[in-house]
Image (tube, rainbow, N blue to C red):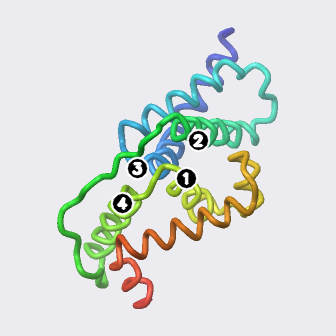
Amino acid sequence: MDPGFEAAFRDFVVERSAALFRTAYLLTGERHSAEDLVQSALARTAAKWRGLRDPAAIEGYVRRVMYHEQVSWWRRRSRVAEVTTGHLPDRAGEGHADVADLRLVMRAALARLTRRQRTVLVLRYFEDLSETEIARVLGISVGSVRSQIYRSLERLKKTAPELTIVRELR
């Protein structure tokens, strides 16, 4: 990579790596897996950096690489490990500490989902992609996206009923 492109890539990584890590964490549910996912996506992006001309589209390209890499990881895994957690709070209240508790509950609930379920929920509700966009990004049909979102939300309701209580309170 020539010095000009290398400096531009380094600047991009410094500016956007925290945001990319947050998305990767939501996709994987684990800090180390999220770090691996960001590193893998950035390595693939570095190899194509010279061909990426539109600065506005670069982050979208990296995120798309992350989504595809995550899909590849959960397709390769024949068995998904469930994460067990300790006792969860009955319900969240009002205030800063309660918001932190809600985050912990949400993190534990997302950890109980499969990678595919977590991926479609992150893309739909965190990245705010439409079902059509999710289908295009993941390379699956819109019907599959809809059924995955439905199943994922149903599983969240069953495994983390405290999230339903919080939703009703707001």
> Is there a contact, CB below 8 Å, between mark 1 and mark 4?
no
Q: Earlier in the sequence, mark 3 or mark 2?
A: 3
Mark 2 vs mark 4, foreground winner is 2
Q: Classify 61 as above or below 152.
A: above
Q: Earlier in the sequence, mark 1 or mark 3?
A: 3
**Residue wearing tag 3:** 29
Residue type, numbered disc 2: Val
Give the residue at the far left of this rendering: 87
Give the residue at the far bottom of this rendering: 169
> Is there a contact, CB below 8 Å, between mark 3 and mark 2?
no
Residue type, numbered disc 4: Arg
**Residue wearing tag 2:** 71
Give the residue at the far front of this rendering: 78
C-alpha span from label 3 to label 2: 14 Å
Residue type, numbered disc 1: Thr
> Is there a contact, CB below 8 Å, between mark 1 and mark 2?
yes
